[in-house]
Amino acid sequence: MRGGSTATTERLRDELRRLYAIDGVSGTRATVVRETFFERPVAPEIGGTPGQSS
């Protein structure tokens, strides 16, 4: 379930149990986001002024 979401921790637990029941699945990776206030862009490279070469 790439990119999926669950509304509660109970639903997440149920989804993980369902995934682990599939033959060949030995692990999962999950990201928990509790709340998002704002998004900011990726920071530019550190250590230089834009337009200048080092």
Image: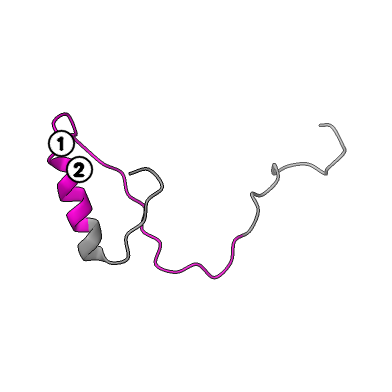
Indicate the position of residue 28 as horizontal and vertical percent values: 26, 41
Name the residue located 87 percent from the left edge and 37 percent from the top edge.
52
Q: Which residue is mark 2?
A: 19
Q: Is 39 in front, or is 3?
A: 3
Is 23 drawn above or below residue 36 in the view shown?
above
Image quarter of residue 14: bottom left
Tag 1: residue type? Ile
Disc 1, SS: loop
Q: Is 18 in front, or is 34?
A: 18
Q: Are marks 1 and 2 in contact (CB under 8 Å)?
A: yes
Indicate the position of residue 24 as horizontal and vertical percent values: 17, 29
Disc 2, SS: helix
Q: Is residue 9 magenta?
A: no
Indicate the position of residue 18 as horizontal and vertical percent values: 16, 47
In the image, which residues are magenta? Answer: 13-39
Q: Which residue is mark 1?
A: 22
Q: Is residue 39 left or right of residue 14?
A: right
Q: Is residue 54 left or right of residue 43?
A: right
Q: Is residue 51 left or right of residue 21?
A: right
Magenta segment main secondary structure? loop
